[in-house]
Image: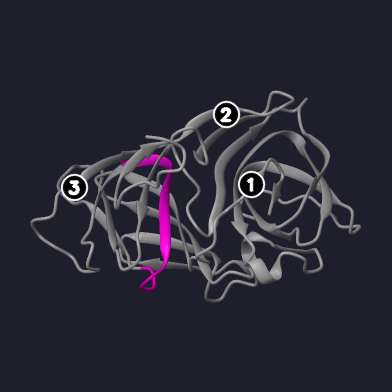
């Protein structure tokens, strides 16, 4: 598949191993040589930064960055004068707009997290850059049957973006005995596009492309480091006998081509 093709509905794909300049490792869902951008989303990856590594000050423009920490802490500094150290469960948003410079280094040892780039609508590309953050206790968490759901972006979260979207951190738990599985159904707004990335554990995924549940649907195995995509109107049901942690991200497409040139999105 060429890099300008989009994944098909409910296709399961492996994230690609990426090494950044400086040696930082990442598992990237997209874009890669085989996985295209997913309007409105430009890039998504899980990154790992060793204690002696980091991203020196560098520029960005034309999109928004959402970083959600999984392990350790990451020291952030930017050209607007913000300095912060988000840690596991914390999130930060950078609106790069007309241009911003920032750096990212591990604090107190190695760190790992998830980074999402969201395209800015064409008429918002040149807005003033901005920064916002939210600690783990500011992000609403609730139990929904077999799932614990934290809303990183969406209803109740203090973090918002220029694009209508939601970002959920979901842990589905089963009994572990194989006789009592846990499940969670995700039903993003109609016409939104999304993906579900497995952070840890494994599960099975199924759904109905018309937005409903189907007892005869085929289920596919989903492992850590894999992701599944959803088109508008899709729902998805994740089930597991043990435990599966995923991030589920969906948003309203802009209907505009994504032109990424390294750290810039035109």
User: Reading the chain from its start, which is encountered first: label 3 or label 1?
Assistant: 3
Q: Which residue is mark 2?
A: 18
Residue 221 versus residue 90 in the image, above or below: above
Q: Residues within 10 Å of mark 3 (few under 14, many from 20)?
A: some
Residue at which label 3 appears: 219
Q: CA distance from mark 2 to mark 1?
A: 17 Å
Say which mark, if any, is on residue 260.
Answer: 1
158 left or right of 250 in image? right
Direction from residue 151 to residue 160 in the image, left or right: right
What's the residue at 56%, 76% (across, down)? Answer: 156
Q: Residue at x 47, y 44 (%)?
A: 36
Indicate which label's residue lies in the foreground, 2 or 3: 2
Q: Residue furthest left?
A: 216
Image x and y of residue 192, in percent: 42, 67
The earlier-in-sequence mark between 2 and 1 is: 2
Identify the element where label 3 is drawn: loop
Q: Is residue 246 magenta?
A: no
């Amino acid at each position: 598949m060429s890099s300008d093709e989009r994944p098909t509905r409910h296709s399961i794909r492996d994230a690609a191993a990426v090494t950044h300049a400086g040696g930082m490792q990442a598992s990237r869902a997209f874009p890669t040589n085989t996985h295209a951008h997913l309007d409105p989303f430009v890039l998504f990856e899980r990154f790992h930064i060793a204690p002696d590594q980091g991203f020196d000050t560098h520029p960005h423009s034309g999109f928004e960055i959402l970083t959600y920490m999984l392990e350790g802490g990451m020291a952030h500094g930017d050209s607007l004068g913000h300095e912060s150290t988000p840690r596991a469960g914390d999130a930060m948003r950078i609106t790069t707009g007309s241009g911003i410079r920032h750096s990212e280094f591990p604090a107190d040892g190695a760190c790992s997290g998830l980074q999402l780039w969201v395209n800015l609508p064409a008429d918002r590309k040149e807005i003033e850059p901005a920064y916002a953050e939210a600690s783990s206790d500011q992000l609403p968490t609730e139990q929904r049957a077999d799932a614990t759901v934290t809303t990183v972006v969406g209803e109740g979260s203090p973090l918002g973006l220029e694009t209508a979207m939601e970002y959920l951190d979901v842990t589905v738990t089963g009994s572990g005995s194989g006789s009592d599985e846990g499940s969670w159904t995700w039903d993003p707004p109609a016409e939104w596009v999304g993906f579900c990335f497995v952070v840890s554990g494994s599960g099975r995924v199924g759904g109905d492309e018309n937005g409903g549940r189907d007892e005869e649907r085929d289920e596919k195995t989903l492992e850590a480091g894999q992701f599944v995509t959803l088109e508008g109107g899709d729902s998805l049901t994740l089930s597991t006998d043990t435990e599966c942690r995923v991030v589920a991200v969906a948003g309203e497409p802009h209907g505009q081509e994504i032109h990424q040139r390294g750290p810039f999105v035109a």
